[in-house]
Image (cartoon, helix red, strand yellow):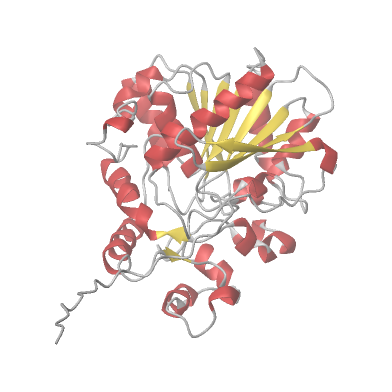
Amino acid sequence: MIFRTPVTRTTRPALRRVRSTVTPRPLRHRLDPAAVEEIPLRAGDGVRLGLTRVDPGESGRPAVLLLHGHTASADMFLLPETRNLVDVLLDDGYEPWLLDWRGSCRLPYNETGGRYTYDDVALHDIPAAVSHIRARIGDRPLFVVAHCIGSLTLSLSMTAGLVPGLAGVVSQGVFLTPKLAGRTSLRMTLAGELLRSRIDHIPVDFRKVGLWSKYTPLFALASRGAACPDPTCQILHHSAWGTGASLFVHEHLTDATHDRLAELLGPAPLWILPHLRRIELARTVVRWNDTDHRYRALPENALDAAARIDTPVLLLSGSENGLWLDSQKLCHDVLARRQPQLDVRYTEIPGYGHLDTFLGRGAALDVFGHILDFLGERR
């Protein structure tokens, strides 16, 4: 009789489905397709990103790099239903460049693929884009207009000295001193502790997840007291992915933009919350990877390294910013006290919230003029 030793099988966790391609989905715009150059770009760590150049039809113009917020994309600067920021930049004599960094909803990384922190964006994504653009434009001026987390991570790149010599930076929403409302901070902490073991991300498109899904309670919570019946609007405008914050002033959006919210803003990954929580508690941008030597180029605390900022900065914020509150005013006041030699100014947009400073129907009249004035003084 032959005795067989039983083979012990170890149960492995199910692998998440990973999209096989990371080619960004097409942008929606009304530009001449021949003028839109899609550039495959690799970040410093090899991650595939998206970079778009809009050809202005003539050479020699100053370049402007546009950075979206987390879960948004380059689409936020190209809305075909309104006069958008790219339209305004082209008309005023600039060459727009748009980066889809790894937090873009045009890329798969928020739902599938390798996880990352904002250290990766600051160390790999933004410097790679700036390096590529500079190789193309030569000695022409390069400006940056950055929104939300795109601006926050840019501040970490700048204080690390990774993107020196920019002609000017416009930061919208938040820069070096993040400040959230108390209930938003509390909900963020609870979500991180209670939900991360159950779900990877918070979706925004109820049509994709369906009524009988594990996400239904989140949408139900977001709908409480909401004036708009659209579930996507509720979880964004009324709840900001369940944090209880507001991302925009509702009446500032056109119907077409409102109907596209699930396309313009994607799922929020919960595994990014520990880094965001550390940043919020410190009230400044701090490095997450403290023991990994690969991230030593980044400062442990960006505010402490603010003296390395070598370019003028315009801090923009809507007076009704329901997510970051008065973070930009706080940043201006702190820098004026701690680094008075820096060229930093603060402008508040009356009646505007957070996202509607770019997505709003009247942004071209109420917001973009401040950006053009700042760039025009330094071109």
Of residues 375 and 279, the one drawn nearer to the viewer in this rendering? 279
Note whether residue 301 is visible.
no
Of residues 288 and 68, the one drawn nearer to the viewer in this rendering? 288
Q: Residue at x 43, y 20 (%)?
A: 309
- Residue 366 placement (x, y as % from top left): 67, 41
Corner quadrant of residue 338: top left
Image: 343 above or below 224 = above
Q: Residue at x 63, y 50 (%)?
A: 24
- Residue 252 placement (x, y as % from top left): 66, 56
Residue 304 is left or right of residue 129, and the answer is left
Q: Residue at x 40, y 42 (%)?
A: 118
Of residues 45 and 65, the one drawn nearer to the viewer in this rendering? 45
Image: 188 above or below 209 = above
Corner quadrant of residue 185: bottom left
Of residues 221 and 16, the one drawn nearer to the viewer in this rendering? 16
Residue 379 is left or right of residue 192, and the answer is right
- Residue 194 placement (x, y as % from top left): 28, 69
Image: 310 above or below 247 = above
**What quarter of the picture does the C terminus occupy?**
top right
**What quarter of the picture does the N terminus occupy?**
bottom left
Q: Residue at x 30, y 69 (%)?
A: 12
- Residue 168 placement (x, y as % from top left): 56, 22
